[in-house]
Amino acid sequence: MIRSKAVVKYLGYILQFNALFLFISSAISFAEGEDSLNILLASAVASTAVGLTPHFLIGKVGEISFQEGLTISVLGWMTVCVAGMIPYYLWGDEFTLANALFESVSGYTTTGSSILKDVEALPKGLLFWRSSTSFIGGLGIILFVLLVLPEKKGAISSIYRVEISDLSKMSFTARGKQVARILATVYLSLIVALTILLRVFGMNFFDAVCHSFTTVATSGFSTKNLSIASYENIGIELVILFFMLISSMHFGLIYATATRNKHNLFTSRVTGMYVLAILLGVLAVAFQLTRENVFEFWVALRHAAFQVVSLASTTGYATVDTAGWPLFSIILLLYFSIQCGMVGSTAGGVKFDRVYLFFVSLRNQLRLILHPNGVYAVKMNGKRVEHTIEFQVMVFIILYLLTLSVTALLLAGMGIDGMTSFSASIATIGNVGPGFGNVSSLGNFGQLPDAAKCILSANMLLGRLEIMNVLALFGLFLRKR
């Protein structure tokens, strides 16, 4: 039985954490003397009031069951997305109701797709709030809250089981709250390091903080209309490229590398194959761009490296508009938008580990056809993968592709062209950001119908929650009826 009081109390904690960043955004708006101050402050007070109410009305709720943890996780993401859209909607201008919801969901899910035609028209307070939603969503607001929960017993283990996939747990030696601390340590350390480096290469402090938030969160929200292209600074590009790549790797392995654990980024076969796949993709795109006379080779290599890593990491920054690139290059970029980064990172998508496991399983199935009496174990990084995890991965990949296809069909049914429909579906369910067609790297989603934006908003949430949790909760409620 799911106790509504327990769920509501933890949703209150989530809203309180969300309000903290609304207050910081308000302070920035106040310091800059901006018109957005009243809007941000009102949103912060409202979020605090609603978040504190359960704290005073509901006593201790004790242990949290797995079903309650699942409900808190799914409803928690939905709640912050609704709360986060309020400042946008109150600001108005380009933010209609559908647009405000889309921008909010895009930020929290670290998708980075935007409806804005003129990002630079927003005041700094709102720009910081926009980047903050990605910061909150990158690690996950649920995991942030786990670090400061006053009621620890049962809650941490239950919610942790929902938020961290079984495949990701294989690279962690720690459990529960210790994992949350490791994730937060790596996450915040990367943000601080990137902020410092961006300042060194000439980016102003405000932009450096905002871009650090959205790079390490692999979101791609920029404070500039032309994204990273607006800086025309190869030093900034290289620094961001490196941090996009590292942020798409398993945070547990990054921590293990920093603490000199023998199972780290350099000894992980999966990580090595991931980097190799990206390298091959970069070279293939660069050669095609050179062959088609789009750029000379070194310029092609520069843009190919940035765009492949940007989409594979699901960050979605841009140094050039990819809409006019050759079809071969676009297809490769679409593949990386489906594959994406590694489990245990801030990246979305199918995840490279699942793709790797699929091919290992395929190889074993082919061996079994040739040698029916053979026994072949599926292993990753020397560890045997249990059949339940193997089965979960296969089901997830099928559900992922099915959801992507249905979304593309729904968009096409609204009269949206094929490339836009297909790539927008990939970009949103993978939390990648840009697609192709009318939603390319330097374009936006603002021209799409409101119904399409609502569908794509749901797609982003499904991608961030990895589909299965939403379906499990839906099935749980159906069974209760």
Image (spheres, rainbow, N blue to C red):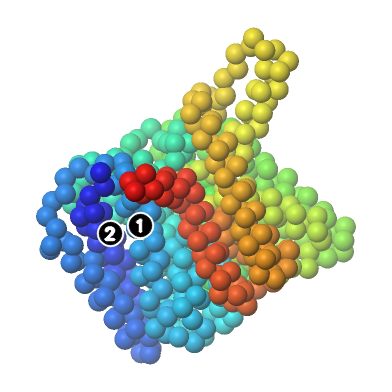
Please give left or right for residue 264 compared with residue 2 in the image.
right
Please give left or right for residue 132 compared with residue 144 in the image.
right
Distance from disc 1 to disc 2, alpha carbons, whole Å, reads 8 Å
Mark 2: amino acid: Leu
Mark 1: amino acid: Leu
Vertical arrangement, residue 454 with respect to residue 175, above or below: below
Q: Which mark is residue 410?
A: none
Residue position marked by numbered label 2 in the rendering: 11
- Which quadrant of the rendered structure holds the N terminus? top left
Q: Residue at x 70, y 71 (%)?
A: 415
Q: Residues within 10 Å of mark 1 (few under 14, many from 20)?
A: some
Q: Residue at x 49, y 81 (%)?
A: 96
Count of marks, rendered view: 2
Residue position marked by numbered label 1 in the rendering: 75
Q: Residue at x 39, y 83 (%)?
A: 90
- Pinpoint residue 60: horizontal percent, then vertical percent: 13, 51
